[in-house]
């Protein structure tokens, strides 16, 4: 592809998501923050993380996943949106974003079985069925119909609160093996009632959440989803790209405004964050949620981490645009915008992805943690701190405030923001 020059670059052309126009096509992807209060209220520490990303003019910021219901918290200090007392803090967050001309979508989530219930003070985790989650060792309880109705309503109410607080849209988290994903996936959904079995039944929870959300926010407010392009669950009944595209198509017909395409469940290993894993395992044990694991899992990690890291490095090595092979299939069948997340760092790779028609926009998580001014740097051509995809950041989710934890990259970031 010829260099289009910074001025004409597709990255800086506007994009419509529903009725909303965003100024460019490089978004911030969700990063769970560990920066709220224990009750899920917005803090200064959280706003400090977002200020430079907004200041850089990032066209769209997608927040870390926010719990819509207390039973849907997965780690400590996540933002909650379960009660009206959260609205003033959310409003400050939206105002900070708008002051710099950026837009912000709230990612709404319920973790289902992907939690260590005791660590969150819960009696049990909920899911579609009682299929044990292998990475954490959690055996969930199947949800009753009353609980399903409660969660559907909680998503709708949470979306309304975000709109009330001045957010520009919401993203329903239907990827990464969280609750909605657990209902979509045959491996985790063994129900025999209206929420399990057929394609329509497994889709029912997401559809009901979408409709409850739409009812509460109206037709003009953008509602998008994050969805896997593949469940990446070998030897289990995970969803394959074709069925996931079908899900997105059904949602588009129902009025959805966009889809961000990702990959994997916790149980898949690490396809969600391809990279290297030595710092990841050490970080989980020293500063992450490693201490919450069972004695057996802790011991296995303490002894086996060099081997695990070696195997993970081989299986899930990093390359830019690692979900594009899925995004392109969505793009082929959908009219709504398709956002591709996964490994992006350079202007050239981002431009190629969009110019080649594989997606309409790209989103970056780790590159923007390392370089919060990434969007500005893409525009000026300057090189900012470069993420090395070491996964020290995600290792600390639930233990330390989200940030870059690679010593040299972090030092470069701190210098940049000083
Ligand atoms: C620190 C951290 C926290 C994350 N938290 C979330 C989250 O709350 N919700 C979500 O959908 N994805 C989350 N992710 C996954 C990212 O949104 C993204 O899908 C993944 O990191 C791949 O994109 P990247 O290569 O640009 O980092 C997180 C990733 C990182 C590194």
Image (tube, grey):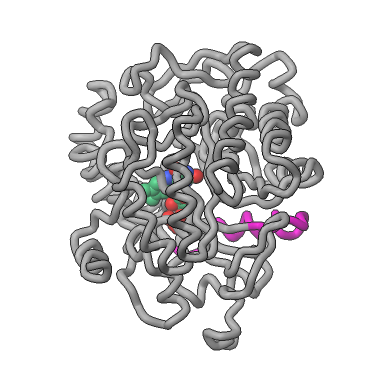
Numbered range of the magenta stretch: 319-338
Quarter occupied by residue 42: top left
Compared with 227, 333 (above or below) is below
In the image, is 284 to the left or to the right of 373? left
Q: Is residue 230 visible?
A: no
Q: Nearer the viewer, residue 234 or 58?
A: 58
Report if residue 147 lies within the magenta region.
Answer: no
Q: Can residue 45 be seen in this view?
A: yes
Report if residue 326 lies within the magenta region.
Answer: yes
Q: Residue at x 45, y 23 (%)?
A: 70
Spot occupied by residue 341 in the image (x, y as percentages of width and height)? 53, 56
Q: Quadrant of the N terminus?
A: bottom right
Spot occupied by residue 270 in the image (x, y as percentages of width and height)? 42, 45
Q: Residue at x 53, y 70 (%)?
A: 350
In the image, is 356 to the left or to the right of 56? right
Compared with 83, 94 (above or below) is below
Q: Nearer the viewer, residue 68 or 400?
A: 68
Spot occupied by residue 134 in the image (x, y as percentages of width and height)? 42, 27
In the image, is 11 to the left or to the right of 56? right
In the image, is 271 to the left or to the right of 414? right
Q: In which quarter of the image is the C terminus?
A: bottom left
Spot occupied by residue 130 in the image (x, y as percentages of width and height)? 53, 15
Q: Nearer the viewer, residue 386 or 68?
A: 68
Tally of numbered discs: 0
Compared with 235, 48 (above or below) is below
Q: Residue at x 48, y 37 (%)?
A: 87
């Amino acid at each position: 592809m010829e260099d289009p020059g910074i001025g004409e670059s597709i990255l800086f052309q506007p994009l419509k998501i529903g009725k909303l126009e965003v100024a460019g096509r490089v978004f911030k992807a969700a990063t769970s923050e560990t920066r709220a209060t224990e009750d899920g209220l917005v803090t200064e520490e959280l706003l400090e993380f977002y200020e430079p990303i907004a200041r850089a003019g990032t066209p769209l910021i997608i927040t870390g996943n926010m719990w819509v219901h207390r039973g849907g918290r997965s780690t400590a200090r996540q933002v909650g949106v379960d009660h009206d007392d959260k609205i003033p803090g959310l409003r400050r967050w939206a105002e900070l974003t708008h002051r710099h001309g950026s837009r912000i979508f709230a990612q709404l989530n319920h973790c289902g079985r992907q939690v260590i219930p005791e660590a969150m003070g819960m009696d049990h985790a909920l899911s579609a069925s009682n299929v044990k989650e292998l990475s954490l060792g959690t055996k969930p309880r199947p949800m009753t119909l009353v609980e399903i109705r409660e969660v559907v309503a909680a998503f709708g109410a949470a979306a309304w609160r975000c709109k009330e607080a001045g957010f520009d849209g919401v993203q329903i988290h239907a990827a990464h093996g969280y609750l909605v994903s657990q209902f979509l996936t045959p491996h985790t959904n063994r129900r025999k009632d209206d929420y399990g079995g057929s394609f329509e039944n497994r889709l029912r929870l997401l559809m009901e959440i979408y409709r409850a959300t739409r009812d509460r926010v109206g037709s003009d407010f953008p509602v998008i989803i994050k969805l896997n392009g593949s469940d990446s669950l070998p030897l289990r009944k995970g969803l394959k790209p074709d069925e996931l595209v079908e899900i997105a198509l059904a949602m588009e017909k129902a009025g959805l405004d966009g889809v961000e395409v990702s990959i994997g469940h916790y149980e898949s290993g690490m396809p969600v964050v391809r990279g290297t894993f030595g710092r990841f395992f050490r970080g989980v044990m020293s500063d992450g949620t490693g201490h919450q694991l069972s004695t057996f899992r802790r011991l296995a990690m303490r002894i086996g981490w060099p081997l695990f890291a070696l195997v993970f490095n081989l299986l899930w090595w990093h390359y830019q645009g690692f979900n594009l092979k899925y995004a392109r299939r969505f793009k082929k069948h959908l009219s709504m915008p398709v956002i591709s997340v996964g490994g992006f760092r350079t202007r050239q790779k981002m431009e190629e992805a969009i110019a080649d028609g594989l997606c309409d926009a790209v989103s970056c998580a780790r590159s923007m943690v390392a370089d919060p001014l990434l969007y500005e740097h893409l525009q000026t051509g300057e090189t900012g701190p470069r993420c090395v995809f070491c996964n020290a950041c995600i290792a600390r989710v639930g233990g330390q405030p989200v940030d870059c934890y690679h010593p040299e990259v972090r030092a470069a970031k701190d210098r940049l923001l000083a």
